[in-house]
Amino acid sequence: MRKPRDFDAELKALEDKARELKTRKVQQLGELVIATGADQLSTNELAGALVAIAETKDTSKREAWAKRGVMFFESRSRRAAPASQRNPRGAPAQPGGPQSPAGGTGSQ
């Protein structure tokens, strides 16, 4: 006879994992705000900029912001990585690459 599954323990483990992932996401977003210098903005300014980018449907603007974000992450990785580990025209070295439009909210 098979041992019955402990659904309560499995559910608790999944809830713990989800909580950990959410905490990590919030921490990484905070680190991104600080790294971009956006922590110098007021909460209202930052929220307004994020709302504006989230509502933007203009693909050329979004692509420009994404390119600027990629450049931001590439420049940070070049300063931090030794010359042998640099990736000159490849994918962004930072795992936050898909979030790059938030990095370019400052001036566009």
Image (spheres, rainbow, N blue to C red):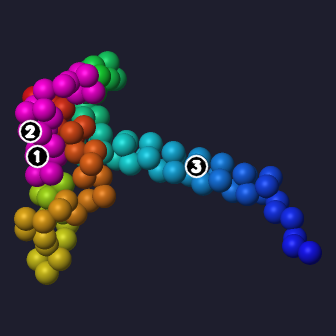
Q: Quadrant of the C terminus?
A: top left
Q: Assign a secondary structure to mark 1.
A: helix
Q: What residue sits right under mark 2 in the picture?
A: 64
Res 18 label:
3
Q: What is the x, y in percent for residue 84?
A: 13, 81
- The residue furthest bottom is 84
Inspect this view and state whether residue 107 appears.
no
Q: Earlier in the sequence, mark 3 or mark 2?
A: 3
Q: Position of residue 11 (x, y in %)?
A: 72, 51
In the picture of the structure, the residue carrying the numbered disc 1 is 67
Q: Residue at x 73, y 52 (%)?
A: 12
Pointer 2 and pointer 1: residues touching (CB < 8 Å)? yes
The residue sitting at the front extreme is 1
> At which x and y percent is residue 77?
18, 63
Amino acid at the residue labelled 1? Lys
Residue 102 as seen in the image, left or right of residue 79: right
Number of residues whose C-alpha sits closer than 10 Å to that of mark 2, classed few (under 14), some (14–19) or many (20 or more): some
Amino acid type at image mark 2: Ala
* Stretch of the chain drawn in magenta: 52-72
Residue at mark 3 to residue at mark 1: CA–CA distance: 31 Å
Residue 21 vs 56, above or below: the answer is below
Q: Could you tell me which residue is drawn at 51 percent across and 46 percent down?
A: 23
| Residue depicted at 32% across the width and 18% down the height | 44
Residue sitting nearer the eye, 22 or 106 = 22
* Predominant secondary structure, magenta span: helix
